[in-house]
């Protein structure tokens, strides 16, 4: 079993319901056990302006799936929630990213772990800090709390619904 962390986000339709549904479906993936999830946050879009704010959270899982198997399973969840990939940073019903997979560093064309931008993004670090502030980033050798302290991202992140859920 490997502990992994998944970033979850949505800004189309009912983003909070989409994130809740994604959490439920992640917990139903064979070979995955949902260990916990952060609160839900309302977050300002990053990368493209003029779109609706997102709802974001993070999930902690244990899994027997290999990284590419987990990626495929998460892509299937996205598809089941009507995710369409049209343009980068476009609005989406759901976005599921593998943030961490144990302490592995994977750099392949279709899979980057840890997620290459997470250390720069408040909308990822805020829920991760709530869920696992002690976790050490395997590339930068700094805790999530330490990355939060060094963060230069000024985008707004607001607590939407408190939910620190641990199994």
Image (cartoon, rainbow, N blue to C red):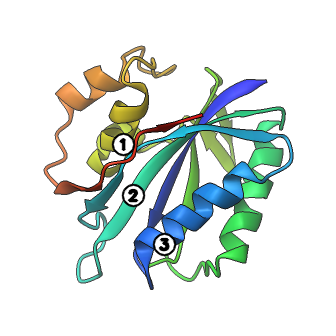
Expressed as whole percent of the image width and height from the top left, the position of residue 150 reads: 19, 27
Residue 89 seen: no
Asked which secondary structure carries label 1, the reply is helix
Please name whichever residue, 28 or 122, is drawn nearer the observer in this view of the structure. Answer: 28
Q: Which sits earlier in the primary sequence, circle 2 or circle 3?
A: 3
Q: Is residue 71 left or right of residue 162?
A: right
Residue pictured at 27% horizontal, 61% vertical = 43
Residue pictured at 77% horizontal, 54% vertical = 28
Mark 3 highlights which residue?
Answer: 17
Residue 80 seen: yes
In this view, 160 is above or below 13: above
Real-space CA distance between mark 2 and mark 3, rounded to the nearest whole angstrom: 11 Å
Mark 2 highlights which residue?
Answer: 56
Expressed as whole percent of the image width and height from the top left, the position of residue 55 reads: 36, 64
Q: Which mark is residue 127?
A: 1
Expressed as whole percent of the image width and height from the top left, the position of residue 25 reads: 69, 60
Residue pictured at 77% horizontal, 66% vertical = 76
Q: Tell whether label 2 touches label 1 (CB within 8 Å).
A: yes
In this view, 160 is above or below 150: below
Real-space CA distance between mark 1 and mark 2, rounded to the nearest whole angstrom: 8 Å
């Amino acid at each position: 079993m490997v502990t992994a962390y998944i970033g979850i986000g949505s800004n189309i339709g009912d983003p909070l319901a989409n994130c809740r549904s994604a959490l439920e479906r992640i917990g139903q993936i064979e070979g995955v056990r949902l260990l916990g999830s952060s609160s839900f946050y309302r977050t300002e879009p990053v990368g493209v302006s003029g779109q609706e704010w997102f709802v974001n959270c993070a999930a902690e899982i244990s899994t027997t799936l290999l990284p590419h198997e987990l990626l495929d399973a998460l892509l299937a969840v996205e598809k089941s929630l009507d995710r369409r990939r049209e343009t980068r940073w476009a609005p989406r019903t759901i976005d599921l990213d593998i943030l961490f997979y144990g302490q592995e560093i994977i750099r392949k064309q279709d899979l980057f772990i840890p997620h290459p931008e997470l250390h720069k993004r408040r909308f990822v670090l805020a829920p991760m800090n709530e869920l696992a502030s002690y976790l050490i980033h395997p590339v930068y050798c700094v805790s999530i709390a330490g990355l939060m302290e060094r963060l230069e991202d000024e985008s707004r992140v607001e607590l939407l619904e408190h939910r620190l859920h641990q199994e």
